[in-house]
Image (cartoon, rainbow, N blue to C red):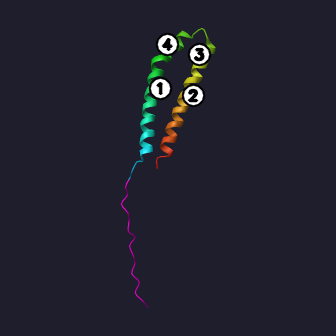
Amino acid sequence: MPEVRSIAAARAPFVHKLSNQFIRRFAASILLTGVNAGVMLTFSPSVFSDSFNAPILRTAFAILILGLIASLALMWFLTFRDRS
């Protein structure tokens, strides 16, 4: 019977390389999150206090803020989903 030698599997070194597209998306996500947070922190208190007697306006602004937060969450989700 012939002698069969076991062949050890050659393992390639694990190299974690971020793609340029991921880096661009990550940078854009950070930039847009910072700008949007600054806008919300700057203008939200004055808009809510000025629209105290206009509940429809206050509700519309709250819906816009929730939409902004949802779009930021979607942007971050898509950024990290396509991280390969």
**Label 4 is placed on what type of residue?**
Ser
Q: Quadrant of the N terminus?
A: bottom left
Q: Which residue is mark 3?
A: 58
In the rendered structure, does residue 12 fall within the stretch colored magenta?
A: yes
Q: Are marks 1 and 2 in contact (CB under 8 Å)?
A: no
Earlier along the polypeptide chain: callout 1 or callout 2?
A: 1
The location of residue 42, given as percent across then percent down, is: 45, 18
**Label 3 is placed on what type of residue?**
Arg
**Label 2 is placed on what type of residue?**
Gly
Q: Which residue is mark 1?
A: 36
The location of residue 30, given as percent across then percent down, is: 43, 33
Q: Are marks 1 and 3 in contact (CB under 8 Å)?
A: no
Q: Decide whether the magenta segment is chiefly helix, strand or loop.
A: loop
Q: Are marks 1 and 4 in contact (CB under 8 Å)?
A: no
Q: CA distance from mark 2 to mark 4?
A: 19 Å
Vertical order, 84 against 26 (above or below): below
Earlier along the polypeptide chain: callout 2 or callout 4?
A: 4
Q: CA distance from mark 2 to mark 3?
A: 14 Å
Q: Which residue is mark 4?
A: 46
Residue range highlighted in magenta: 1-15
Which mark's residue is nearer the viewer, 2 or 3? 2
Q: CA distance from mark 1 to mark 3?
A: 18 Å
Describe the element under mark 2 as helix, strand or loop. helix
* Residue at (53, 29) in percent of width and height: 69
Residue situated in front as seen by the camera: 83 or 3: 83
Q: Residue furthest right?
A: 56
Earlier along the polypeptide chain: callout 1 or callout 3?
A: 1
Number of dots carrying numbers: 4
* Residue at (41, 84) in percent of width and height: 4
Q: Which residue is mark 2?
A: 67
